[in-house]
Amino acid sequence: MAEERVRVSPEVCSYVDDEHATLSIEVSIPGVSKEDIVLRIHEDSMNLKAPRGDIEYVTTLSFCCPVEHNKAKATYKNGQLIIDVPFKDVMKDAVQVKIE
């Protein structure tokens, strides 16, 4: 039979840098092996699963503004997962409209 894990929400702190260019997310997941962390990021949200023994840290977060998810960087050290992802330029895909 598969091992049963209790799912718990990790402590999460998110903030924006002084230039309002990057979203930083700090997730406390002590005792988790870096190789076991599954982090998925979309332009408007993220999902995390990180098993440790008989518990599994799980969380899903929505972002305040779209991010460049393909430019996300994550580091894990001493039980702290730190994710930095730049905000998407809201005018990036804008087209100029000719005024008649």
Image (cartoon, rainbow, N blue to C red):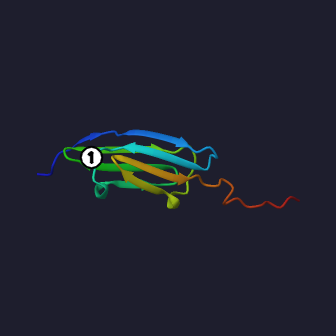
Mark 1 surroundings: few (<14), some (14-19) or many (≥20) residues within 10 A: few
* Residue situated furthest left in the rendering: 1
What kind of element bears circle 1?
loop
- How many numbered marks have been drawn onto this rendered protein structure? 1
Query: Which quadrant holds residue 54?
Result: top left
Query: Which quadrant holds residue 7?
Result: top left
Q: Position of residue 52 (x, y in %)?
A: 24, 47
Q: For the point 32% across and 50% down, which residue is it?
A: 49
Q: Of 77 and 20, which appears nearest the observer?
A: 77
Q: Position of residue 63 (x, y in %)?
A: 52, 45
In the image, 60: left or right of 98? Answer: left
Q: Position of residue 29 (x, y in %)?
A: 33, 44
* Residue situated furthest front in the rendering: 78
**Residue where numbered disc 1 is placed:** 31
Q: Of 10 and 58, which appears nearest the observer?
A: 10
Q: Of 31 and 2, which appears nearest the observer?
A: 31
Q: Position of residue 14 (x, y in %)?
A: 49, 41
Query: Which quadrant holds residue 56?
Result: top left
Q: For the point 58% across and 46% down, which residue is it?
A: 65
Q: For the point 58% across and 52% down, which residue is it?
A: 87
Q: Amino acid at mark 1?
A: Gly
In the image, 47: left or right of 68? Answer: left
